[in-house]
């Protein structure tokens, strides 16, 4: 008897739900939707008191984050409608544009540091309306984080390069050019100002290479280069060395100095206990926990919702990880498979690094918690990436056949998403008449050609 036949009760019901054609699609929508709503609630909880204390509305920060969420949902809608060929067409332009933006940010940051006297507050170096502040690039009132855009651009570009090379990736020469020079240059440029985002880019890069089946010796070489590069980048900034020292030897760290944020986060987690002090009732976020609304929002969650709330959040991220890898294993086209693996490694890896830094399992890197932390560019890009995953979930062979067997109404396709392409081998079955008649002319062949072109 098959394993599925021996299951009973809740496990059988769960197996039946997961075997449905559109299971990946609905799991993805549910997990991303829950994370987005949960994030807005926690941003309000982490910022309302501080906003009120400085004379603003208690809803100021969450209203701004909700506005970015609307922009991100629009990006989600656009990305889940686009065909695969569009992503492959724009990936080169996207990666070049991101490299240019990062170079501009690094240049302005260097000029700002050069023109700032010792122990003085930095005054941004301006070129007309263009200036940089920390990790943000400003053009007048508009601002963005180039490193966040680079994550999505790198996932698309690396997947396209590896797909075009096909089986040639077994050759070191074919794998090296142009992949490694561009990727390593992007890592160095981003890591100059943003070590945490550089780490996420590296995790994403490894995820795509792993999904492509690259040889293990390539990963060994990459880890050796990464160790040298990260050592050099850590040596450039004293605060990075302090964070590493706090992680390696917290007992001797100065709790009122470099280790202040680290220990305040641990105090918040300890104060929460099993069930937390109640949503909105945490007190360490009242000016005592730096970046409580952003990098350390998980500490606020732990204090207010306790271990139970943290476990629920981790469970939702686990569902997102399972769904992303499920999509990567089920889609037919290698480009979809590699992009799905890269986006999943990026979002889930970033969540692990953020939570690991807050709990003391890893050094603090300053990366936000995806979908949860306050921040516009990060939220918009993450939702756009989720939209791409949604498009690929609809392109799973079983999902595509189910959607074509009972297509939604035309207005639904127009408003939400068009039908995905039929998988190879499924087009012929679709063209067969229900009564058992053969294919209508060469319609199956034309359908397969359309699949290849898409």
Image (cartoon, rainbow, N blue to C red):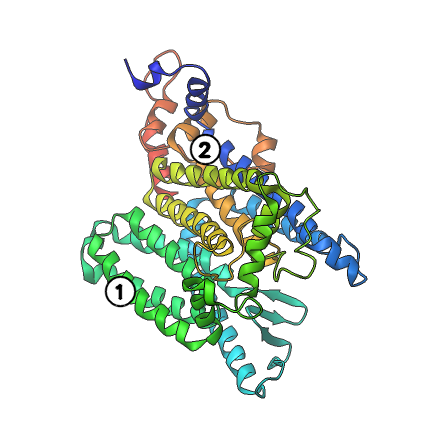
Name the residue carrying label 2.
Answer: 24
Q: Residues within 10 Å of mark 1 (few under 14, many from 20)?
A: few
Furthest toward the right, the residue is 55
Is 315 left or right of 211, judged from the image as shown? Answer: right
Which quadrant, please, contains the C terminus?
Answer: top left
Is 111 left or right of 161, judged from the image as shown? Answer: right
Q: Secondary structure at mark 1?
A: helix
Furthest toward the front, the residue is 251
Q: Secondary structure at mark 2?
A: helix
Name the front one of labels 1 and 2.
1
Mark with earlier residue (1, 2):
2
Camera-nearest residue between 110 and 284: 284
Furthest toward the left, the residue is 171
Per the model, the C-alpha gap separating discs 1 and 2 is 36 Å
Instruction: Residue 378: give x, y in percent of width and height.
Output: 55, 56
Name the residue carrying label 1.
Answer: 224
């Amino acid at each position: 008897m098959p394993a599925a036949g021996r299951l009973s009760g809740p496990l059988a019901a769960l197996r039946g739900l997961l075997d449905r054609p559109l299971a990946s699609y609905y799991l993805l929508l549910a997990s991303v939707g829950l994370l987005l709503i949960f994030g807005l609630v926690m941003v309000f909880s982490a910022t309302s008191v501080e906003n009120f204390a400085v004379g603003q509305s208690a809803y100021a920060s969450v209203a701004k984050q909700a506005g970015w969420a609307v922009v991100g949902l629009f990006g989600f809608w656009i990305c889940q409608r686009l065909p695969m060929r569009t992503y492959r067409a724009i990936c080169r332009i996207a990666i070049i544009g991101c490299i240019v933006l990062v170079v501009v940010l690094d240049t302005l940051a260097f000029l700002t540091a050069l023109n700032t006297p010792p122990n003085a507050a930095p005054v941004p170096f301006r070129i007309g309306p263009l200036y940089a502040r920390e990790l943000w690039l400003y053009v007048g009132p508009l601002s963005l984080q180039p490193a966040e855009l680079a994550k999505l651009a790198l996932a698309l570009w690396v997947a396209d390069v590896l797909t075009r090379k096909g089986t040639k990736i077994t050759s070191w020469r074919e794998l090296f050019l142009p992949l490694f020079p561009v990727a390593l240059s992007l890592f160095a440029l981003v890591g100059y100002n943003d070590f945490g985002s550089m780490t996420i880019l590296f995790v994403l890069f490894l995820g795509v290479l792993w999904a492509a089946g690259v040889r293990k010796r390539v990963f060994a070489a990459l880890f050796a280069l990464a160790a040298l590069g990260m050592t050099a980048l850590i040596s450039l900034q004293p605060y990075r060395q302090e964070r590493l020292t706090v992680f390696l030897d917290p007992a001797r760290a100065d709790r009122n100095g470099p280790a202040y944020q680290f220990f305040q986060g641990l105090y918040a987690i300890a104060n929460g206990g099993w069930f937390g002090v109640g949503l909105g009732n945490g007190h360490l976020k009242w000016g005592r926990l730096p970046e409580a609304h952003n990098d350390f929002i998980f500490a606020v969650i732990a204090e207010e919702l306790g271990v139970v709330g943290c476990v629920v959040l981790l469970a939702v991220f686990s569902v997102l990880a399972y769904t992303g890898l499920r999509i990567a294993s089920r889609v037919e086209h290698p480009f979809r498979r590699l992009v799905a693996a890269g986006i999943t490694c990026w979002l889930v890896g970033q969540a692990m690094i953020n939570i690991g830094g807050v709990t003391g399992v890893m050094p603090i890197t300053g990366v936000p918690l995806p979908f949860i932390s306050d921040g516009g560019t990060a939220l918009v890009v993450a939702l756009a990436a989720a939209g791409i995953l949604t498009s690929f979930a609809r392109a799973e062979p079983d999902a595509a056949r189910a959607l074509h067997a009972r297509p939604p109404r035309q207005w639904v396709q127009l408003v939400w998403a068009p039908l995905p392409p039929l998988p190879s081998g499924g087009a012929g079955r679709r063209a067969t008449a229900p009564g058992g008649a053969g294919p209508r002319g060469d319609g199956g062949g034309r359908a397969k050609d359309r699949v290849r072109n898409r």
